Image: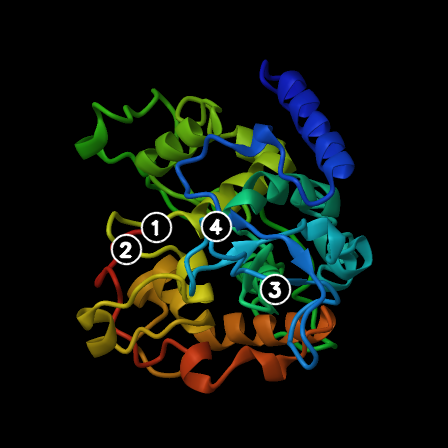
Amino acid sequence: MEYKWSVPLTILLAFTLVLLANCDYKYSSLNKGLPLKSCYHCPTYKPPPGAAGASLGCNCNGGSTSPYKRGQPCCKGAVRHYFKMDQFENIFSNRNSLEVETHANKGFFDYQSFITASALYQPYGFGTTYMNWTFFGTREVAAFLAHVATKISCGNKLATMDQLAWGSCYNKKMNSNSNYCDEHYKKAYPCAPGVAYFGRGPLPIYWNYNYGQVGKDLKVDLLNHPEYIEQNATLAFQVAIWRWMMPIKKHQPSAHDVFLGTSTPTKNDTLAKRVSGFGTTMNVLYGDLVCGHGDNESMDNIISHYLYYLDLMGVGREEAGPQEMLSCAKQVAFNPSFTSSP
């Protein structure tokens, strides 16, 4: 079924890619407008001898006249500069396999859709962040896709070379009779008649208030037409990265923040053993559905995907950090006793 926004959105996204291709490390003005703080755009220098990072490093501290504040992140480049199609295909190597044959969205999530979606968030640090001389972009993309893979996978197995969890079978979750309409938000985000707000996308969003907010931020009417996420892979990835970049609640960090360690831990965070790293991204996204229960299959499944993707992307799992940064087994949830998926 055709929908009115598809053609102009496609043109806009294509135009965005052309601008990005021609401006190299300069970010397009079309990417502005999201309720996110832009990441400081750093100049490009060769890193000092022995510095970790890419072949060209970022001197985040740009001098006394720079608006940059020491200790904050800075950003450069684009995800497409280092994350290539063959790496995406290796990560989702069975996305077009016979196991996916019975699913309507065979091959739905493709490389170009992810790259186009990521371009919207690069000015805000998604996949482009340096801390001093160290590049964290590749690790962040691996972390994000680890969460994605465990949500859209055909299987639910630990990530190893001989398993079949690489297929992308699902772009929606229809395993509940609930329409996920919270009447508490009926003024701000009124539920459309006959519409159900069950989980859709690579990082599924639920509930009318999430559909309403992300639709407002992306300027797409998802409150009345949540099915758009099922019909456009670029939009689906944009919604998923929005979930990664935005806090679940006010005054809480996002998954992006806790992964990079750019948020300032509170006393409660310290007491709750919420340390910066991959483990706390699970806490942000899933709360006590996954975290605070010791070692468990759901948590180990997500971690195993992250470690395997670090290897596939040439970073190496040894760069993942110690176990306390990888796991949320002993963490107290940011939002205890979730009654629904965020």
Mark whose residue sits in front, 4 or 3: 4
Q: Position of residue 291 (x, y in %)?
A: 34, 72
- Is 320 positioned to the left or the right of 23 in the image? left
Q: Which residue is mark 4?
A: 65
Disc ID at residue 142: 3
Q: Residue at x 64, y 63 (%)?
A: 138
Secondary structure, mark 3, is helix
Q: Which residue is mark 1?
A: 247
Q: Which residue is mark 2?
A: 252
**In this orientation, which residue lies closer to the viewer: 254 or 27?**
27
Chain-order first, disc 2 or disc 4:
4
Chain-order first, disc 3 or disc 1:
3
How far apart, in angstroms, are the residues tagged by discs 3 and 1? 20 Å
How far apart, in angstroms, are the residues tagged by discs 2 and 4? 32 Å
Q: Quadrant of residue 264?
A: bottom left
Say how the picture is coloured. Answer: rainbow
Q: Amino acid at mark 2?
A: Gln
Chain-order first, disc 2 or disc 3:
3
Chain-order first, disc 4 or disc 1:
4
How far apart, in angstroms, are the residues tagged by discs 4 and 1? 32 Å
- State yes or no: discs 3 and 1 in contact (Cβ < 8 Å): no
Secondary structure, mark 4, is loop
